[in-house]
């Protein structure tokens, strides 16, 4: 019997329609119940569908809704499918997304546009599920653009502030650059394969494109362009820090747990194309390694707690791209899952702090909060331990350690990639505990105005539990042979290719562990033992502004484009058309003089015109 898997995205879409059409008439409890209920039901249905995967990870579900369009032999259908890779993403989207919706019921309670917020959030989840469940790349592109639209709406949710509108436009425009590359890649695939069906393309990739050919590289790099834009990787990472203009639950859902990892999903889903091009694989790894280091350094100089987490997100996705580039597909997805837990936890806990301090986001105006907000502190600390990859007691250690080891042990890995990833781990622990010590210790600088209730704290506790114990489903080979995650994904993703001479995993783990602890120790010396103050300098400002990529792009692209646009506004071609328009206007005014209200004049004009017409026809 074919399972109606279309119900999964349909439930959030129905929730959106209800809230969009009737939200203004519903009480707040009804709005929250509708928004949360749609995602909760989708999650429960996902659990029900998952029983088939417990006995057979290679199980695959498919459902075709209808034939979408027909252009000659190109006949894509609106079809959905679920395999083990898709199922992992579905659980994260609906599970973590449901907790974020639950948290939002209290967090957004006093904000204007309560129904609009939940409507947008439901719409986003529906499009994200469409993206990961797509059987063909055209349906995937539909979900891809849908989450882009929702990101624009949610980043600019507080639209009365022009700065928020600017941030929303910036995110929309920058990601469109990557989306354009993705669209060109899809057109190339249509030309070569005659279809966008993912399974068909994967099965015939080698025979159609060939291994290590220019065409295979071009297709993979174009797809990578889309992934880089959506996942905020170099050189299109500039939109994500400004996207913190949206409410904290938006940051947790879209910019930590789901949408920004869509690029990771795209590369993993189309791995058959990337494997054909060593150059494309190397490019993915290099982009990931450089991004994780550059973003981590930027996070070290931020004073806005949400911007610290924004750069941290860019950095952690860089680790995922590094794993994809060295062929450690399962390791990338494993870190995606653990990152979704601890980064959603950190964003929500940061949101609780911001709300408690009457919307204060500057860490240097916080301090002394560990006694005033104990639940928030402990859950934030658990998320931070995972982000800093504290050895053996945090889920983030197991997922990140796996990537760092594969950066050297994989046949596509090398010492440079390993070094960048290891240095990134040190800086990550340093900026993470810089954030902890400045925010929760020291003297109190801003009075606590609000104590978050259970609606906000229970999701934090659940995410803290998942963050702590989630890593134990995939342990390193030298600790225990627990590879449940890799085994589950083995039917969807190929195994990583390992060098014949393996580097000593235990020693490499020890190096990473020592560096992580050293970062915590240095943060303790710099930000706990002395009262932290933020000092400005040209160097700090450079890193605060994200290595001045915005200024670079403004100089290279924005200003020249604006100059050309202004110059072109009064060019010769426009003057020709303006002249024609002016003459037509004069002619119209002249003809209008004949409208004088005299019937005899009208009749005479008609007769004269009729005579002229007869003469013309006879002639």
Image (cartoon, grey):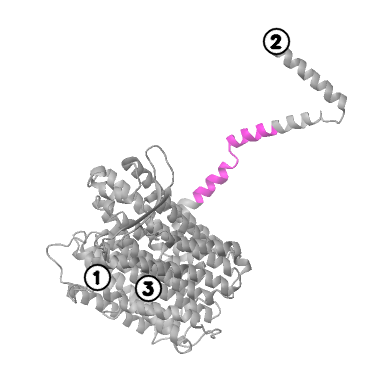
Q: Please state which of residues 177 and 460 is positioned toward the viewer in this rendering.
A: 460
At x 52% / y 58%, what residue is drawn? 169
The span shown in magenta is 559-582
- Front of the two marks 3 and 2: 2
Which of 122 and 245 lies nearest the eye of the viewer?
A: 122
Crowd class of label 3 (few under 14; some 14 to 19; many from 20; radius 10 Å): many
Farthest front residue? 1
Magenta residues, dominant SS class: helix
* Residue at the image position 40 percent from the left and 59 percent from the top: 4
Picture disc at residue 341: 3
Q: Which mark is residue 618?
A: 2
Mark 1–mark 3 Cα distance, whole angstroms, equals 18 Å
Nearer to us in this view, 505 or 568: 505
Quadrant position of the C terminus in the picture: top right
Element class at badge 2: helix
Residue 129, image x, y percentages: 41, 61
Question: Most extreme residue toward the bottom, as rendered?
Answer: 371
């Amino acid at each position: 019997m074919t399972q109606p898997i279309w119900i999964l995205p349909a439930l959030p879409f129905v929730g959106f329609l209800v809230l969009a059409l009737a939200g203004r008439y519903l009480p707040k409890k009804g709005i929250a119940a509708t928004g949360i209920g749609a995602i909760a039901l989708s999650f429960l249905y996902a659990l029900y569908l998952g029983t088939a995967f417990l006995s057979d990870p290679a199980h695959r579900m498919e459902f075709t809704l209808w034939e979408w369009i027909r252009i000659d032999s190109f006949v894509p259908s609106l079809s959905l499918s679920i395999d083990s890779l898709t199922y992992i993403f579905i659980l994260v989207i609906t599970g973590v997304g449901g907790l974020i919706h639950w948290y939002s019921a209290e967090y957004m309670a006093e904000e204007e546009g309560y129904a609009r917020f939940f409507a947008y959030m439901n719409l986003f989840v529906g499009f994200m599920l469409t993206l990961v469940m797509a059987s063909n790349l055209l349906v995937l592109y539909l979900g891809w653009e849908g989450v882009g639209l929702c990101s624009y709406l949610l980043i600019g949710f507080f639209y009365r502030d022009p700065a928020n509108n600017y941030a929303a436009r910036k995110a929309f425009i920058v990601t469109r650059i990557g989306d354009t590359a993705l669209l060109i890649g899809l057109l190339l695939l249509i030309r070569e394969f005659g279809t966008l069906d993912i399974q068909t393309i994967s099965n015939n990739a080698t025979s159609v494109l060939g291994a290590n050919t220019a065409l295979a590289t071009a297709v993979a790099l174009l797809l990578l362009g889309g992934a880089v834009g959506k996942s905020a990787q170099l050189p299109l990472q500039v939109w994500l820090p400004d996207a913190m203009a949206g409410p904290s639950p938006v940051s947790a859902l879209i910019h930590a747990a789901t949408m920004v990892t869509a690029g990771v999903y795209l590369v993993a889903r189309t791995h058959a194309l990337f494997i054909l091009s060593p150059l494309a694989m190397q490019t993915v790894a290099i982009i990931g390694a450089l991004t994780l280091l550059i973003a981590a350094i930027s996070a070290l100089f931020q004073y806005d707690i949400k911007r610290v987490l924004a750069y941290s997100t860019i950095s952690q996705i860089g680790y995922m791209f590094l794993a994809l580039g060295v062929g450690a597909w399962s390791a990338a997805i494993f870190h995606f899952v653990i990152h979704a837990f601890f980064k959603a936890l950190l964003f929500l806990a940061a949101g609780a702090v911001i709300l408690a301090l009457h919307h204060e986001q500057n860490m240097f105006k916080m301090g002394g909060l560990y006694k005033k907000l104990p639940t928030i502190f402990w859950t934030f600390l658990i998320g931070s331990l995972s982000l800093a990859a504290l050895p053996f007691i945090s889920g983030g250690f197991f997922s990140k350690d796996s990537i760092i080891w594969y950066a050297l042990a994989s046949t596509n890995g090398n010492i440079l990639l390993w070094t960048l990833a290891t240095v990134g781990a040190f800086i990550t622990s340093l900026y993470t505990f810089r954030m902890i010590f400045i925010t929760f210790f020291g003297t109190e600088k801003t009075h606590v105005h609000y104590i978050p209730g259970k609606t906000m704290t229970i999701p934090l506790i659940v995410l803290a539990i998942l963050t702590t114990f989630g890593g134990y489903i995939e342990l390193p080979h030298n600790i225990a042979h627990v590879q449940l995650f890799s085994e589950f994904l083995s039917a969807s993703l190929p195994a990583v290719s390992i060098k014949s001479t393996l580097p000593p995993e235990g020693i490499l783990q020890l190096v990473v562990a020592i560096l992580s602890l050293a970062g915590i120790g240095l943060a303790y010396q710099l930000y706990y033992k002395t009262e932290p103050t933020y000092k400005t300098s040209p160097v700090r400002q450079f890193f605060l502004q994200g290595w001045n990529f915005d200024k670079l792009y403004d100089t290279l692209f924005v200003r020249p484009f604006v100059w050309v646009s202004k110059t072109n506004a009064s060019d010769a071609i426009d003057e020709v058309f303006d002249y024609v328009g002016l003459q037509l206007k004069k002619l119209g005014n002249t003809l209008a003089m004949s409208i004088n209200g005299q019937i005899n004049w009208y009749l005479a004009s008609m007769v004269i015109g009729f005579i002229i017409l007869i003469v013309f026809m006879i002639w």
